[in-house]
Amino acid sequence: MSKVFNFSAGPAMMPPAVLEKAQAELLNWQGLGTSVMEVSHRGKYFMEMIAECEQDFRKLFNVPANYKVLFLQGGARGQFAAIPMNLANKKGKALYLNSGHWSSTAIKEARNFTQVDEVNILNSDRTLRVEKMDFSDIAEQYDYVHYCTNETISGVEIFDVPNVGNAVLVADMSSDILSRQIDISKFGVIYAGAQKNMGPSGITIVIVREDLLGNARQETPSIWNYEVQAKSDSMINTPPTFAWYLCSLVFKYLLENGGLAAVEKRNLAKAELLYAFLDQNSFYKNYVAAENRSIMNITFTIDNDELNAKFVAEATAAGLQALKGHKVLGGMRASIYNAMPIEGVEALIEFMKKFEAENA
Ligand SMILES: Cc1ncc(COP(=O)(O)O)c(C=O)c1O
């Protein structure tokens, strides 16, 4: 088979070295003569694996000691409900910053559990730009302030952390976790589905400051209760063992390849290459302001539905997969998460040049 580059927004490509390792030890994990998915999650080997996995994740992402790291199920959408169930318990209201599809989906779910005040932080012009970042005057009236660091569909990323004074800041980092270094101490809770930068779908990481545990509403199901899960090694029910194992391999792989400083450098180089091409070109357009251009999901369009469809079909045939934009936005989207090599971006640019020459 000729070389394929997979630009899927999620589940997304995994580092090939990780898949090869998983393949090599699939039938005989740890010399046990069985695979990792066939052993007890409470057995010695699995418990050792998850302890090391958490240590590696903490090291990689520089997680402070006063935070718990939970490995849960139910995806980021599960957390859209778990966040208010665990946190909206003192003032009974939360502030949500709306920057697009995923933050508004989180708002809709949160309204089932608490009073939500919403601030639109995205301007409404053709060029998408996040405008308001200082909420220190109002934030403390709320149990927490929620935002999404990277809107996967539009390719809008928020690099500066909003100012919320001493209020609890909660972030959905599903599509940019582990893509760059951040100061975790500014956050009360960070959550993310694994399926973009950490592993396969089926596992969700929640990083929660310890002082926020123990306040869940009475009716909170145990699987969504952060305190219960923290006390049970994230195993109040049978965990997604194979997904957890694959995440552990991804964290090791990233640590062995320079950690997040090196990851961030590679990600910036890839994104700059593609945006530089888009900027010197008038055939393809990207409608995100420079300061909010995602380094993970790069959206572009030819502003012509027929040509967009032709582009996607011909790109797929050329081995450049999953470039179709999300149905709510149309156009194209190149998701270039950690595992995408720079050669994938170079191949995409070469294809874009060729397509323009044939169709402009
Ligand atoms: C930013 C963001 N939040 C939430 C979700 C929903 O994630 P899940 O399917 O894990 O519930 C996605 C999925 O793509 C996402 O990109």
Image (cartoon, grey):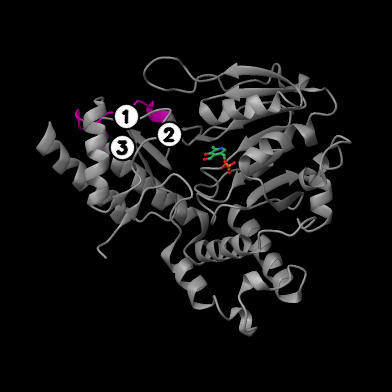
- Residue 285, x across and y down, in percent: 27, 28
Residue 133 vs residue 153, the one in the foreground: 153
Question: From mark 3 to mark 2, how far is it between C-alphas?
Answer: 12 Å
- Residue 191, x across and y down, in percent: 64, 43
From the viewer's perspective, is the residue at label 3 or at label 2 nearer?
Answer: 2
Question: From mark 2 to mark 1, how far is it between C-alphas?
Answer: 9 Å
| CB within 8 Å, label 2 to label 1 | yes
Q: Is mark 3 within 8 Å of ligand 1?
A: no
User: Tag 2: residue type?
Assistant: Gly
Residue 327 vs residue 360, the one in the foreground: 327
On residue 275, the disc is: 3
Whether 232 is drawn above or below 8: the answer is: below
Question: From mark 1 to mark 3, how far is it between C-alphas?
Answer: 8 Å
Q: Is residue 285 magenta?
A: yes
On residue 16, the disc is: none
Q: How many marks?
A: 3
User: Tag 1: residue type?
Assistant: Asn
Q: Which residue is mark 2?
A: 155
Secondary-structure class at tag 1? loop
Q: Is mark 2 within 8 Å of ligand 1?
A: no
| CB within 8 Å, label 1 to label 3 | yes
User: Looking at the image, in which quadrant does ligand 1 appear?
Assistant: top right
Query: Can you tell which quarter of the image residue 53 is in?
Result: bottom right
Labels 1 and 3: the sequence-earlier one: 3
The C terminus, quarter of image: top left
Labels 2 and 1: the sequence-earlier one: 2
Magenta stretch, residue numbers:
278-291
Q: Which residue is mark 1?
A: 286
